[in-house]
């Protein structure tokens, strides 16, 4: 049992923090009013009183709590990142599809324009042949 355990128990059972006792009370009456026997009813109720932790331990506990809260955030951020990546991939696929459709339309327009040019050239040649045939 740590050396300060009795003092701590006294304070815990009395419900006081380190406060000075009135000068009218003697230390003899104070210690006699508390039963520190191991068979104390409060000790046998199943409630174990915890000794307050020191500053180092408290800081370590806070660090662990912060670390745990950061660990809780990681899966959330990871899932959000996955969603963003999936959305970006989907948008890329849509853009690719739009570009493919536009390219096909452009090729079709170029083919039609080429056919029209050939048709115009053929018509002009026929017209020239008719003019040559009518002149002779």
Image: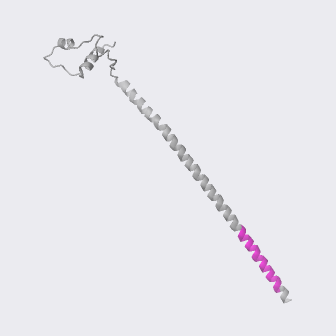
Residue situated furthest bottom in the rendering:
135
Query: Which secondary structure class fits the magenta region best?
Result: helix
Residue name at image x 81 percent, y 86 percent: 131
Q: Is residue 62 left or right of residue 110?
A: left
Residue name at image x 80 percent, y 83 percent: 128
Question: Where is residue 15, by image quadrant?
Answer: top left
- Quadrant for the C terminus, please: bottom right
In the rendered view, would you say 52 is above or below 3? below
Pick whichever, 97 or 46, lies toward us. Answer: 46
Residue 60 falls within the magenta-colored stretch: no
Residue 79 in view of the camera: yes
Q: Is residue 14 left or right of residue 133?
A: left
Q: Position of residue 40 (x, y in %)?
A: 28, 13
In the rendered view, would you say 65 is above or below 122? above
Q: Position of residue 85 (x, y in %)?
A: 56, 46
- Quadrant for the N terminus, please: top left
Residue situated furthest left in the rendering:
24
In the rendered view, would you say 129 is above or below 94? below
Residue 125 falls within the magenta-colored stretch: yes
Question: Where is residue 120, by image quadrant?
Answer: bottom right
Residue situated furthest right in the rendering:
136
Region of the chain picked out in magenta, as a range: 111-131
Question: Where is residue 26, by image quadrant?
Answer: top left
Q: Position of residue 76 (x, y in %)?
A: 48, 40
Q: Is residue 20 left or right of residue 92?
A: left
In the rendered view, would you say 56 is above or below 79? above
Residue 4 in view of the camera: no
Residue name at image x 34 percent, y 25 percent: 55
């Amino acid at each position: 049992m740590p050396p300060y355990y009795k003092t701590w128990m006294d304070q815990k059972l009395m419900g006081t923090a380190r406060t000075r006792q009135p000068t009218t009370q003697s230390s003899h009456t104070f210690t006699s009013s508390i039963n520190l026997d191991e068979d104390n009813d409060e000790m046998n109720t199943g409630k174990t009183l915890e000794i307050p932790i020191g500053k180092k331990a408290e800081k370590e506990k806070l660090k662990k709590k912060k670390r745990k809260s950061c660990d809780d955030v990681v899966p959330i951020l990871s899932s959000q990142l996955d969603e963003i990546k999936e959305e970006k991939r989907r948008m890329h696929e849509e853009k690719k599809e739009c570009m493919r459709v536009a390219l096909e339309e452009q090729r079709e327009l170029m083919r039609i324009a080429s056919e029209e040019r050939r048709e115009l050239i053929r018509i002009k040649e026929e017209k020239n042949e008719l003019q040559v045939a009518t002149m002779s």
